[in-house]
Each structure stands twice: as C-alpha cells, then as structure tokens.
Amino acid sequence: MTTNRGAVLPLTAAQAEIWFDEQFATGPLGYNMADYIDLRGPLDADLLGRALGRLGHEAEGLRVQFVEEDGAPGQIIRPLAQLPLKRLDFADEPEPLAAAEAWMRADHADPLKVTDFPLFRGALIHLGPEHHLLYLCMHHILADGFSRALLYPKLAALYTRLAAGEDEHALDADAMPPFHRLLDAERDYLDSAHVERDRKHWTTRLTAGAHGPAPELVSLSARQPAPGRSALRHTARLSAEATDAVRALARDGKVTMPVVMVAAAAAYTQRATGVDRPLLTLPVTGRVGAASREIPGMLANYLPLAVPVRPDTTRTQLLRQAWIEVSGALKHQRYRGDRVRRDIGLRTDDRRPFGPFINVLNQDPALAFTGACDGTIVNLSTGIVNDLIITVLNTADGTMEIHLDGNPELYTSAELATHLARFEAFLTDLAALPADDPVGRIGLGAPGESRGLLGTWDRDAEQAHYEGLVERVRAVAASSPDVVAVSDGTESVTYRELLTRAAGVAARLRASGMEPGAVVAMLADPGVPFVAGVLGVLGAGGAYLPLDPAAPAARNAGLLQDSGARHLLTGAGHDTPAPGVTALPLTDPADATCATELPAVGGGLDLAYVMFTSGSTGRPKGAMVQRSGMVNHLWAKVGDLDLAAGEVVVQNAPLTFDVSVWQMLAPLLVGGRVRVSGTEMAADPAGLFAMVREERVAVLEVVPSLLRAALDAWDLDGRAPELPDLRWLMVTGEALPADLCERWHAR
C-alpha cells in the first residue's frame, strides 16, 4: 500500500514549478491554501484526531519532505511524529466565529516554506457545545484543488467508520493508492508521443495563423506585474433566483457550469479591455486515468484559454466558442503551462499570467461526520494570487458563491469590489440575455453605476458626474491664480491671466455667431495664445480643429470643408486658406482685460476636438473626440505620470498630432505649468535639453531620432546637461532601439 520510505522521489512538473519559483523569489510567496470545515453537532475531538492521522497515513503526498541533491530537487515520504493540529477555544469570545475567522486569516498569512516539514498545519477550534471549526492550511506544492475533493470526503468517511468501530485492517482495504503512482503516470506521459501532439495543439491555438492574430496576454490592472505575496478577497453570493438563472443558462446551452463561467469571464474581460480574443488562465487537474484521480498531490496545470468574443457575438455563439476552447484544453491538459509560455516566446522571468484565472470548484460542500454531525467546507484561499482569480463555488443552501482574489500590488480593495459587483451584474444579465442577442447589449457596470460607452448609457448619470476641462482649470485658478500656467519662451501667463484671455476669445467667437457644438478651426503656431484659444473654444461650447501652418493652403481648405468649420482663429502672419469662413485673430489686445468669466458651455458627450489623419494612405480622415473621452485621457496621463502642482511639462508635439492634447492640457488639471517649446526648439536637441535643465522640466516626450542626436552631441562634447528634475523621459513615435536606452541610462 505504501511507497518505500526514505527513497528520494522526483517532483511532479507542477511541484518543480513551485519549487523553483520559491528558490528564485526575493521574498516569501503566498503559496498557502486553506479551508475550514464548519462542524455542527456532537463531535469526538480525539476520534477526529485519529481520522486525521489515518488520512495523513494514506495520503502519502501530504507528508513529503523536499530535499536538494546535486542541485536537483526531490522529495522523501516521511512519517509524522506528531499531527500538527492545535486545539483552540473561542467559545467565550463575544463573537466566537468572527474571532476564529480573524485567527485563521492571520495564520494563513504566515507563509509555509518548501523547506519546512510538515508542509501543512491545522487547528480544531471550539466555538460552542456542538459547534467546531476544523481549519486546514497547506503549501500548494503538496496538493491542488482537485485534492480537496479527495481529502475532505475521505476524512468524513474515516471519522464515520472509526466511530462505527471499524479496525485498521478494514480501513486498509479501501486505502488510497500509493503516491508513486501519481509520479509514474506523469512520467509515462512525458515519455509518450502525446507530448508532441499537445505541443502542436497549443502552438497552433496561440500563434498567428488560421485562428487569426495571436491572442493577447491581458490584465484588468494597468500596474506592472508583481509576485503574489498576499491577496485581497471580496465575496458575493448569488441569490437563489440568480443561481437558478445561471444554471438554466448551462442547461439551455447544453454546456457545463465551468463553460458558462469561462464564457462570462471572457466576455467581461473583452468589455473591460477591448481585446477581441482575450486570454484567460484556466486551472485544470492534469489528471487522466483512474489512478491519478484517486491520489492527492500537486498535479494541477494552468493553461491559456483564448475565447473569441466581440460585442456582436451572440449568447449562443459565446457559449459555443467557450465550449470549443474548454474541451480542447481538457484534451491537451497535461502539457505544462510553463512550456506553453516558452513555446510562444514568453521569458521565464515574465510574471504575467495569461489572463484572469477562472476557477470553478464544482463540488458539494456538505459532508457527513456520522449521522449526527454535519460539516460544510468553507474556502479561505486557493493558493498564490499573481494577478486576479475568479473562484466559483457551490454553497450549502444550493446557491453559488463568487470569490474575487487580487494581488494587492495590482489592485486596491475598492477596485476589486467594483470588479466583483460588475462581474456579478454581467453574469446575471448574460443569463437573462436572449440566445440570439449580442453580448454587446450587456452594460459593464454594477447596479446603480453609470455603465458608460461599454453598455447602456445613462446620460443623466454621466452628465451629473462630468467635470469638464474648463471647469477644472477654473477651480485651479480659484486656488492658485498667480501661479504660472503656460509659458513659451516669449511670454508667460498665470492661471488668472490664462482664463481672462480665454474668456476674451470665447466672447469674440460668440459675438461672431458661433453656436455651441460648432467646430472652430485654429491656424497658428504653438504658444501661449494657442492654449488660451483652445480653452476659449471649449468654454464657448465649440470643438477645436488644429490646422498645420506649414501645410499647403489647398489641404487646409479641404479640411475646413470636410469638418464643416465656419469659424477660424488665425495666428499672426497666417492667412485664411478658404473663403466662406469667418476669420478672427487668435489674439486681441482686449482679451487681456476681458471682464466676463470664461463660460463652460457643453457636457461630456459634446465634441472636444477634431483631428485629421495625414492622408498618406488616401484622403485625410477626421477623428472626432468627445469631451468626456478627452478628460478621461488627460486624467489617465496625470495618474500614469504622477503629475503634481508646480511641475513643468513640455509641449513639443505638432498641434495636429493628438499627443499635443495631453502635453498642452493635462498639467492644467493639477496646477502644473505647460512649457511650449515652439517648432524650432522642438527639433533642436541642444536647445531643448538646455531649456529642460534651466526651467526644471519634470516630463519630456521626444522621438528616438532626436534622442540619438542629443546623445551623439554629448558624446562629441564630452559632457551632458545635468537634469535632476526630469522625472520622465518618454520616447515615442518611432521604433526605439535598445542601444538608445542603454546610452541614456548610462548617463
């Protein structure tokens, strides 16, 4: 029945992945997995200890010690001198269950290390005369989620049989198979032709070819990947009605519950990221054959799942696509996920998962510890959380529970709560969606939340929460009126002066007959007047259209005609490129003393600006950007770059490029200063970086060719400017050669 104790056994591939992950980690990782069994009824604690001891005797994989010989890891099955089970009593606490849960959370947060022995621990917690909790925590290297379905029912059965007086010989007849059979089954697979068959399956699915472009790794977080050292959890329990609807969806679609959840997670991820073939991470048992399905141990695999989904995909099509992907994954589930990563070109130190985990533990949580004592399994953690895990479980009352676990380095508690509320609503709406309706009809929002452009638009809610650019700049000016807002090397204006000049532009536009919603063209060089003009156009309720002063007059005339612009603001030295347009000077001496406040006409759904493509592949095309979209983009730049009041950002992009929008406007949201470089300085690396040094610039964006010219000049001169205030150098617009990065960082 047992493996030869003392022999060094190889690790499963899953164990090896965890072993090496811990060896190369810079700190402890959150590989603890934990549950507790809520026991109601008369319980014999000593008998339960005997049942646990017997379970540890049969489940050899739970009492292995990991060793290293000649640089290679192995494992040795060892006897347990003493069961690592504490006995705790919280019955006298004001809230016994809450006190016990707090203790279990704290214990779970204390990481087991692969060098420990044993790699599991537990506690029997007394809460009342007939109420106990059996807490069990183990390192993920010992067991996977499938093992839970073997261990807990086995424990209940052993307790029941021991209570009935059965002896050891009777129990031996039904003992679990020896652990080495699990290892033998994996070795047989690795020596078979199935490996190459499975490799071809995954390579075909995940590289560009017949299935379309290669699917993308995705995350619902914009932060950089980080090791899973701890986890945040939020939980939602579906109502009985919602649970019935989701199960009816599975029946109607003739699919399993895991397929339904995969479909919902794929569609939700597509809506949240915009990726049409998002990758999910699917945990699978990795067990094929009767023997491996009877032996607890760590054999689980984590595989990529690419479900094609677009907003016009119907509910029926979505379920079908999810079924195709899940069934294909199960047929090829023994090919390791780390090999898949290597095959598609991911580096071994890339900690990104394929995508959000979707883990459906479709098991009965109810256990019978004799006829008088019942147990209910409650999950605390399924193991390490590198990014995001959606875990779906059955509950004792017949409903379903959804846990959302997130890496706190990537998600805040509020972000997880929002995602969980949205996913729960999305799942419920998917279950109610007619079979042939597109999933794009489902909004991406929780009840009471504005769902935005990704779903049903609540215009009133959107308008109520919208704060426009003009309103925001007015608020900054009210608190910091004398702070410099914009400078261009020739002049500078404070926030008070900027709003005054913008108000003058707005007043002149309205006096000339401009109506709210109209497109106003601007033909001028970059500088303080242009920034004031943009605010004036927006304040008057218009959308601005930048024209290139260096472009042929015929091109600008064509853009004016296509855009429908009837008003044009012109800078000094520039003529009107087309008849029939009301031309006004961009600057007027009276603007500086305008007595009226800059208005704020228009809402989030109105246009902010229009920009045309270069037309190099055909006729120029105009892109129209709404105000809420522009403001969202500006705030995203503020967040990404951590912009703060008083910091200087250079505006050096051509005004007809959308990069100029954030450079020119994002600093104004937080009381920063926009330093307009002008076209000549923007192309002069020596002058540009000298200005960056002298004016203590915090953020600069350049193209690689300009950076190379600057570095070459510094190498020739043997010196470079000191730039202690430059926090961000953004290099965009062209391919960035690696040598430029190395040369920049070397300086």
Image (tube, rainbow, N blue to C red):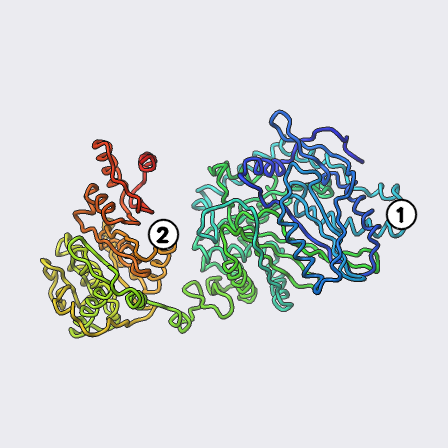
Horizontally, residue 502 falls left or right of residue 117, namely left
Mark 1 is on which residue type?
Glu
The first of marks 1 and 2 along the sequence is 1
Instruction: Return the residue at label 2.
Output: 641
Instruction: Return the residue at label 1.
Output: 166
Closest to the observer, 669 or 224: 669
* Residue 188 showing in the rendered view: no
Horizontally, residue 485 falls left or right of residue 303, namely left
Q: Residues within 10 Å of mark 1 (few under 14, many from 20)?
A: few
Q: Position of residue 653 (x, y in %)?
A: 24, 51
Secondary structure at badge 2 equals helix
Q: Position of residue 179 (x, y in %)?
A: 73, 37
Closest to the observer, 598 or 690: 690
Horizontally, residue 310 falls left or right of residue 357, namely left
Horizontally, residue 743 falls left or right of residue 122, namely left
CA distance separating discs 1 and 2: 69 Å
**Quarter of the picture holding the C terminus:** top left
Closest to the observer, 441 or 303: 303
Q: Which disc, if any, is residue 637?
A: none
Secondary structure at badge 1 equals loop
Q: How many marks?
A: 2
Q: Position of residue 556 (x, y in %)?
A: 16, 58
**Quarter of the picture holding the N terminus:** top right
Q: Position of residue 176 (x, y in %)?
A: 78, 41
At x 60% / y 39%, what residue is drawn?
18
At x 60% / y 32%, what residue is drawn?
193
Mark 2 is on which residue type?
Leu
* Residue 500 showing in the rendered view: yes
